[in-house]
Amino acid sequence: EIVLTQSPGTLSLSPGERATLSCRTSQSISSSYLAWYQQKFGQAPRLLIYGASSRATGIPDRFSGSGSGTDFTLTISRLEPEDFAVYYCQQYGTSPPRYTFGQGTNLEIK
Amino acid sequence: QVQLQESGPGLVKPSGTLSLTCAVSGGSISNNIWWSWVRQPPGKGLEWIGEIYHKGNTNYNPSLKSRVTISVDKSKNQFSLNLNSVTAADTAVYYCAREGRGGYNLGGWGQGTLVTVSS
């Protein structure tokens, strides 16, 4: 089973700053299989990025994804107050478990 | 816009069976996508439980496979989760979700329902 490691565990930034979140997989994966989610307190996760770099419907263009192989990045170009949340990366497995998640990065207001 | 809504008991006794249903609205469960269950223990991360296709094909997380059954009811446009022999470790918010655009992701989620395992 592929393990996803996200860093940092907590990221403290101010509105207007740039956020860079990392997701490393224990084995090389297809970029098609990497997604990012945002989860606000008390809410369900929301898909942000799929296929490593494609924004989901309705996601602002300040969110971007990049990477390949074992190293993937979610970048938020200029933080808005509503962006402070927990972010998870996810990989798709060709055999079960189909979806495996990283442990999350907590993006908090500095 | 397809919407998902979980329902079921919020409290289950240890060694009992957790049963939840996910109602699909705004679209057909017979669309060519997979439907999943995901759970999240309080204060912890996300764990995929399993998925089902409208024809009844299923895939389960190996860590839960011996205790999980996911089924589909096309006449009611819903799918269900049964998890047996539950313990306190199964206490979590349970989400149903649908496969998203392009596949390989979960593009839509229900609001989630908290299930507590306690006597």
Image (cartoon, coloured by chain):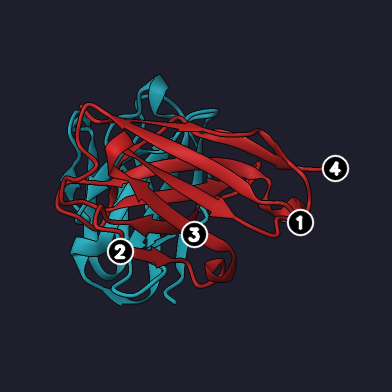
Chain colours: A cyan, B red
Q: Earlier in the sequence, mark 3 or mark 1?
A: 1
The residue at the point 32 percent across, 35 percent down is B76
Mark 1 Cα shell of 10 Å, populated few (<14), some (14-19), many (≥20): some
The residue at the point 19 percent across, 28 percent down is A58
The amino acid beneath tag 3 is: Thr
How far apart, in angstroms, are the residues tagged by discs 3 and 2? 11 Å
Residue placed under numbered mark 1 in the picture: B15
Residue placed under numbered mark 4 in the picture: B119
- Are dots 4 and 1 in contact, CB under 8 Å? no
Chain under callout 4: B
Chain under callout 2: B
Left or right of B85 on screen, residue B51: left
The amino acid beneath tag 1 is: Ser
How far apart, in angstroms, are the residues tagged by discs 4 and 1? 10 Å
Decide: is A79 above or below A8: above
Secondary structure of the residue carrying numbered label 2:
loop
The residue at the point 44 percent across, 49 percent down is B37
Residue A43, horizontal then vertical, whole percent: 48, 29
How far apart, in angstroms, are the residues tagged by discs 2 and 1? 27 Å
Q: Does label 3 lie on the same chain as label 4?
A: yes
The residue at the point 43 percent across, 59 percent down is B50
How far apart, in angstroms, are the residues tagged by discs 4 and 2? 34 Å
Chain under callout 3: B
Mark 3 Cα shell of 10 Å, populated few (<14), some (14-19), many (≥20): many
Q: Earlier in the sequence, mark 4 or mark 1?
A: 1
Q: Does label 1 lie on the same chain as label 3?
A: yes
Residue placed under numbered mark 2 in the picture: B57
Left or right of B12 on screen, residue B27: left
How far apart, in angstroms, are the residues tagged by discs 4 and 3? 23 Å
Residue placed under numbered mark 3 in the picture: B69
Residue A94, horizontal then vertical, whole percent: 28, 73
Secondary structure of the residue carrying numbered label 3:
strand
